[in-house]
Image (cartoon, helix red, strand yellow):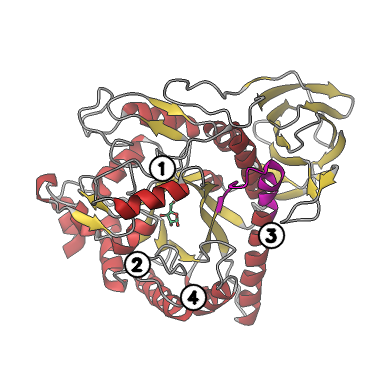
Amino acid sequence: MKAKVTAHSRYMIADIDKRIYGSFLEHLGRAVYTGIYEPGHPMADESGMRRDVIELVHELDTPICRYPGGNFVSAYNWEDGIGPKEERPTRLDLAWRTSESNQVGIHEFADWAAKANTEMMLALNLGSRGLDQARAFVEYVNHPGGSYWSDLRKKNGRADPWDVRVWCLGNEMDGPWQIGHKSALEYGRLANETAKALRAFDRNLELIICGSSNADMPSYPQWEATVLEQTYEQVDFISLHMYFENYEKNTAEYLALPEKLDRYIGTVSGVIDYVKAKSRSKREVKISFDEWNVWYHERKNDFERMAEWNWPHAPALLEDIYTFEDVLQVGCILNTFIRRSDVVRIACIAQLVNVIAPIMTAPGSGAWRQTIFYPFKFASTMGRGTALRLDVESPSYAADVAADVAYLDIAGIHDADAGTLTFFAVNRCGDQSMTVALALERFGTARSAEHILMQHDDLEARNTAQGPNTVVPRHGNGVKVVDGGLELELPAYSYSVVRVQL
Ligand code: AHR
């Protein structure tokens, strides 16, 4: 199979906001307890944080991390997680039917985020609570001192404010499963009033309103129109979420789903433009795609187990073990964000540790990289710069979500400072390799090119505690520098990174 791609130095999409490689940690299952935090573990530091996990987070280089939920946040009292640990209450977490010990709260998470080199992105509870507790929390976190909440933070051991810039106004408020679920109008009004109060404190905060929980919600996309109409002048982002499933075990259909993601982003981008025009506004609202990942391997099973159990603390939950097939999917998802980087300025893989996550841990034992760790790491560390508007000619196939799914899924980035071009390419064809003629126009001479390849004969291959290196990247030999460009040889069902030094 043959494909042709042209990259031109003047055809650009946008400077990528590195926050599209963000992540997410929720008080859910073992994400926090025995994930990032495990006092007594041989690798725990003086605060009980696992150093082996922090090292893996460094490797991912995720610039921002959303916390503390997710569905959890919609019945969370942030004050339960401050002050002496022995005095913190155990609460029932209604979202996941578990017990929350509150041994990790904002102070512990902030310390961990500093060690992990990631900025905090905090979510506010607009489900069971509202404006007043939201403003108190922001004051606690961001005010230097001389007020009730900021002085309480100092008393609790943190003198300087953390100066968190990015705040989520609730989580998935369109979802009937959400504690404190609201109609679009109810939520839009509450979010607007909360945003006004937060802006009265600091007009430069970056505020995110909830869009739809997924593109199949019955209220989508009217939800987006209504909440944006209520909030447009007060907010900076609208959040979207999407999880990818392959219950039918149909790889072609599964790998076509990023076309649906692309359309979802395009539609919401259109709704933003519509509300902007309607309200005669000059404001730019962007998309925060703050939950995305593959989530189906353990999903049904988990919901059945949850219904039966008796409020356990930090049980194994949503511990999907990812496959090689999921590498291809995560590669295509990240490519979609790069190609939509003009409008998607934040995106968070959901989640980071143990819960539908690239990093896994065993309590009292080791930590390892899931298969999807690698495409995320490569995009996060090598996918920074300016996204290129590539011209792609590829054979395609028909799927349920789109009539024309290109077998070649590719994104390109130019880093002018480093003098590099980077391409992430997925061959979505399972029975043929693909030869790609990649023309490079007006970038200067390509001096060398490196090829990193992920390919496995078994789409179901996984990394586990016992076999953590079953699916790993290797150096490929499928890239040749030819006159005026590159020739790529992409094996059937493969993920490639091509880095060109100019
Ligand atoms: O990431 C798991 C859950 O998925 C989150 O708590 C929720 O926001 C979404 O439905």
**Which residue in the protein does label 1 denote?**
355
- Place of residue 345 in the rendered image (x, y in percent of width and height, measured from the top left): 57, 54
Magenta segment boundaries in residue numbering: 243-259
Q: Is mark 4 within 8 Å of ligand 1?
A: no
Question: Does the rendering let one see residue 147?
Answer: no
Up the image or down, 83 lies above or below 134; here it is above
Q: State which tag comes first along the sequence, 1 or 3.
A: 3
Q: Which image quadrant for residue 314?
A: top left
Which type of secondary structure does the marked residue at label 2 adopt? loop
Q: Amino acid at mark 3?
A: Arg
Up the image or down, 236 lies above or below 190; here it is above
Mark 2 or 3: the one toward you: 2
Q: State which tag comes first along the sequence, 3 or 4.
A: 4
Mark 1 → mark 3, Cα distance in angstroms: 27 Å
* Quarter of the figure that contains the C terminus: top right
Mark 2 or 4: the one toward you: 2
Marking on residue 284? none
Mark 1 or 3: the one toward you: 1
Mark 1 → mark 2, Cα distance in angstroms: 20 Å
Front residue of 162 and 297? 297
Q: State which tag comes first along the sequence, 2 or 4.
A: 2
Q: State which tag comes first along the sequence, 4 or 1.
A: 4
Which type of secondary structure does the marked residue at label 4 adopt? helix
Marking on residue 231? 4
* Quarter of the figure that contains the N terminus: top right
**Which residue in the protein does label 2 denote?**
179
Q: State which tag comes first along the sequence, 2 or 3.
A: 2
- Place of residue 497 in the rendered image (x, y in percent of width and height, measured from the top left): 68, 30
Front residue of 15 and 391? 391
**Which residue in the protein does label 3 denote?**
263
